[in-house]
C-alpha cells in the first residue's frame, strides 16, 4: 500500500510542476523574460540576495536550532530554489510593480535550474551525495521545457492559451492538495514530529527571507517590496523535484510543504501590509 501511495505522490509532484510551468508560459510573453537582462545591476542584486545571502542565512538557522538532517536538507534545497509563479500575484496584492515582479520571477527560475545543482552539494558539505547532472536534467525537463511550450503556444495561439491557462492553474492546485494528502498518509508521524524546532526553523526561514529581500531591495519602496516577496516566496516546484527524486528522508518533503503552507499565510499577510 505504501508503494501505491508513494507512486501517487511522485505522480502528483510531476503533474504539479509541469502544470505550474505550463500555466506560467501560457500567461507570459518573451518580452517579460528579456526585460531583467537589460538591467545588469538588478540581475546582480537579485542573484546575490537569493543565491548568496539567503542560503548563508539558512545555514545560520540550521546551526542555531537543533533540527534533524532532513529538515536542514529541506531548508537548504528551498534556499537555492527561487522564482515561484506566485510572485507576480503577491506583487499585485501589495500594489507593487507586477511587471518587475514577473521579470524577477523568470530570472530567478532560470537561475535556479543552473545554480541549484551546483550549490546543493556544496551546502550539504558532502553529508549527502547528490547527482548534480541528474538534478539539472530533471529541472530542465520538468520546468524549462513546459515553460517554453507554454510561451510558444501563447505566441502562436493566444486564444487557445487563454482557454487552457486557467485549467492548468486548477490542475496545479489539485496536484498540490494531493501532494499534501499523500504526505499525511505516508508520513503522518514525521509530520507530527516536525512540530517543534522544525516548525520554528520554517517560520524563521520565511521571516528572515522577507527581511533580507526588503533590505537588499534598495531605496525605491516598490522595488523593495518586490525584492522582499520574491526572496521569501521560494520555488516549491523545483524544491519538490529535487526532494522527491534524490532524498528518501520524509522530513525533506515535509519541510518543503510546511514552507509552502505556512509561507502562504505569511506572504499574503505581508503583501497586504506592504500596501501604501
Image (spheres, grey):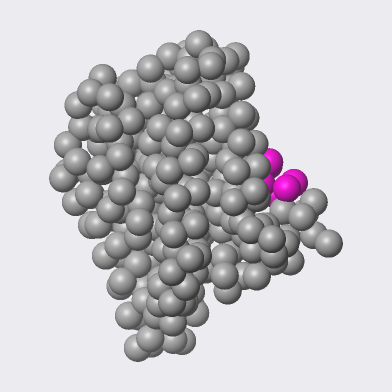
Q: Quadrant of residue 153?
A: bottom left
Q: Nearer the viewer, residue 207 or 12?
A: 207
In the picture shown, does residue 230 fall above or below 242?
A: below
Vertical relation: 61 (above or below) 274: above
- On whether residue 274 falls in the magenta region, the answer is no
Q: Name the image quarter holding the N terminus.
A: top left
Q: Is residue 25 visible?
A: yes
Q: Quadrant of the C terminus?
A: bottom right
* Residue 90 in sight from this viewpoint: no
Magenta part, dominant SS: helix
Q: Which residues are magenta?
A: 264-270
Q: Quadrant of residue 243?
A: top left
Q: Residue at x 35, y 56 (%)?
A: 111
Please give the count of numbered marks on the rendered protein. Answer: 0
- Queried whether the magenta region covers residue 268, the answer comes back as yes
Camera-side residue: 236 or 231?
231
- Residue sitting at 49 percent across and 79 percent down? 162
* Residue in view at x 64 percent, y 48 percent: 215
Q: 58 and 144: which one is in front? A: 58
Residue furthest out toward the right: 276
**What residue sits 57% from the left and 65% below the top?**
101
- Expressed as whole percent of the image width and height from the top left, the position of residue 218 reads 64, 58
In the figure, 97 relative to 247: above or below? below
Q: Position of residue 47 (x, y in %)?
A: 43, 54
Left or right: 211, with 185 as reference point: right
Q: Position of residue 166 (x, y in %)?
A: 52, 68
The percent coordinates of residue 134 (x first, y second) are: 17, 44
Name the side, left or right, on which 257 lies relative to 91: left
Amino acid at each position: 500500500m505504501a508503494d501505491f501511495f508513494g507512486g501517487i505522490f511522485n505522480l502528483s509532484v510531476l503533474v504539479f510542476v509541469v502544470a505550474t510551468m505550463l500555466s506560467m508560459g501560457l500567461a507570459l510573453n518573451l518580452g517579460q523574460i528579456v526585460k531583467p537582462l537589460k538591467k545588469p545591476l538588478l540581475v546582480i542584486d537579485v542573484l546575490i540576495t537569493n543565491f548568496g545571502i539567503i542560503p548563508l542565512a539558512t545555514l545560520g538557522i540550521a546551526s542555531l536550532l537543533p533540527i534533524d538532517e532532513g529538515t536542514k536538507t529541506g531548508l537548504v534545497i528551498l534556499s537555492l530554489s527561487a522564482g515561484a509563479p506566485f510572485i507576480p500575484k503577491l506583487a499585485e496584492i501589495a500594489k507593487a510593480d507586477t511587471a518587475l515582479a514577473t521579470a524577477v520571477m523568470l530570472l530567478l527560475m532560470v537561475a535556479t535550474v543552473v545554480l541549484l545543482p551546483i550549490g546543493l552539494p556544496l551546502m550539504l558539505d558532502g553529508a549527502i551525495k547528490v547527482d548534480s547532472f541528474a538534478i539539472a536534467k530533471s529541472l530542465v525537463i520538468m520546468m524549462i521545457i513546459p515553460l517554453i511550450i507554454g510561451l510558444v503556444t501563447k505566441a502562436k495561439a493566444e486564444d487557445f492559451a487563454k482557454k487552457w491557462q486557467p485549467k492548468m492553474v486548477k490542475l496545479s492546485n489539485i496536484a498540490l492538495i494531493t501532494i499534501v494528502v499523500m504526505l499525511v498518509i505516508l508520513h503522518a508521524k514525521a509530520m507530527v514530529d516536525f512540530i517543534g524546532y522544525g516548525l520554528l526553523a520554517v517560520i524563521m526561514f520565511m521571516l528572515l527571507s522577507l527581511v533580507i529581500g526588503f533590505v537588499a531591495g534598495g531605496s525605491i519602496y516598490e522595488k523593495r517590496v518586490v525584492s522582499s516577496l520574491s526572496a521569501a516566496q521560494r520555488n516549491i516546484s523545483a524544491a519538490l523535484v529535487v526532494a522527491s527524486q534524490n532524498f528518501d528522508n520524509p522530513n525533506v518533503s515535509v519541510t518543503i510543504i510546511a514552507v509552502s503552507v505556512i509561507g502562504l499565510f505569511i506572504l499574503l499577510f505581508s503583501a497586504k501590509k506592504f500596501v501604501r
